[in-house]
Amino acid sequence: MSNQRKPTLIDIARESGASLATVSRALAQPELVKADTLERIRSVAKRLGYVPNRKARALASGQSHTIGVVVPTLHSPIFSACLQDMQRSFAAAGYQLLIASHEYDMANEAAALTQLLSHGVDGLIVVGAARPPATWEMIEGAGIPLVQIWEGQAHLDCVRVDNHRAGFLVAQHLLDLGHRHIGVICGHLKNNDRQSARLDGIRAALAQTGLSLVRSQISEQPVSIGAGRTGCTTLLQLVPRLTAIIGTADLLAIGAMVEAQGRGFVIPADLSIAGIDNVDFAAHLAPSLSTVDIPAEAIGTEAAALMLLRLSPPGTGTVETRELPISLVTRHSTGPCMP
């Protein structure tokens, strides 16, 4: 064969001794082809370097075998873990992810969704429900399956966790340790229903003890370690007799810990710090971080399973909300409030 020409189905048929129809069926619907024939055709296709023409396949089948996913950021270990397991599940079913991020900018999200829809994705996965009505109109008007993750609207498929309870659990943990002067470093709240729910959960736990969370006890920051350091500095300046800090994402809590330790605080003797997410390295810090476990990998796996269910014939069914369990993970960054 000439190196100037891409191998075709005809080439594979000639080399494998199978009919053109059998080769086409083997590559498009392998379950309909005998195992030995399928193996022979795949072996020849691999040797020739054959790459399927997805555009042609999409035109013939009406499906692109791609799924569009839009997440707030690719810098987050939580979203990365979710996407990794999601990709693994879709790949096993013959689908490819097209991933975009919007950096918490709703105009960027709308643009990303427009691009994904123009590529003919078979389904969409989005994070949360907080977005402008015009964006929702575009999503629902596309007429393709949609799965929301982390949070979502009740009338649409969703794989979620109880973010309100996550905030409640971490606050209650500190209250049980005797802490009453608590500061919170949270992500930006605008168009972020996950962070808002976690903050509301913290407020609810404090309210049960007769405490409130005033504005000076909250430092709203981008979700990063550096921003956690900034938030810690702010809280130390504004909250009298501060004994504990909650980061509504582990990255914020870790940044707070780095800043506090740099200022000479002993964690947790001088200052208890806790997070939410349970990122992989939270257990390996010194001291290890108390946090709430959010099963990011399972969210990715369940979202893929729900999407594949919607894409399978007949592709209908009642709306599902799959809520995954969360749990408090107590480690060494929190301790009793010292008088």
Image (cartoon, helix red, strand yellow):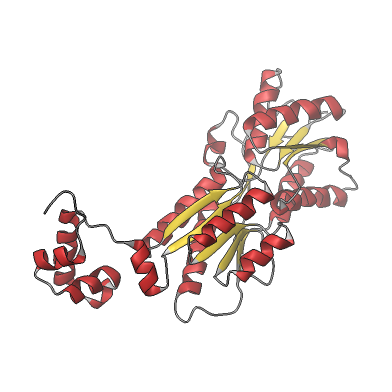
Report the residue that reaches farthest toward the bottom. Answer: 314
Q: Place residue 45 in its image quadrant.
A: bottom left
Number of callouts? 0
Provide residue 163's location: percent of width, then percent of height: 69, 54
Provide residue 329's location: percent of width, then percent of height: 62, 45
Report the residue that reaches farthest toward the front. Answer: 4
**Residue at the image position 73 percent from the left and 55 percent from the top:** 164
Residue 295 seen anywhere in this rendered image of the structure: no
Q: Name the quadrant of the N terminus.
A: bottom left
Q: Place residue 290 in its image quadrant.
A: top right
Provide residue 191's location: percent of width, then percent of height: 73, 51
Q: Which residue occupies the foreground of this view, 143 or 95?
A: 143
**Residue at the image position 50 percent from the left and 48 percent from the top:** 81
Q: Is residue 30 above or below residue 283?
A: below
**Residue at the image position 49 percent from the left and 63 percent from the top:** 304
Q: Which residue occupies the foreground of this view, 66 or 32?
A: 66
Q: Which residue occupies the foreground of this view, 59 or 97?
A: 59
Q: Name the quadrant of the C terminus.
A: top right
Residue 95 seen anywhere in this rendered image of the structure: yes
Q: Is residue 169 above or below residue 90?
A: above
* Residue 120 falls left or right of residue 212: left
**Residue at the image position 70 percent from the left and 34 percent from the top:** 273
* Residue 57 falls left or right of residue 308: left
Provide residue 335's location: percent of width, then percent of height: 71, 34
* Residue 90 falls left or right of residue 330: left
* Residue 56 falls left or right of residue 297: left
Report the residue that reaches farthest toward the right. Answer: 210
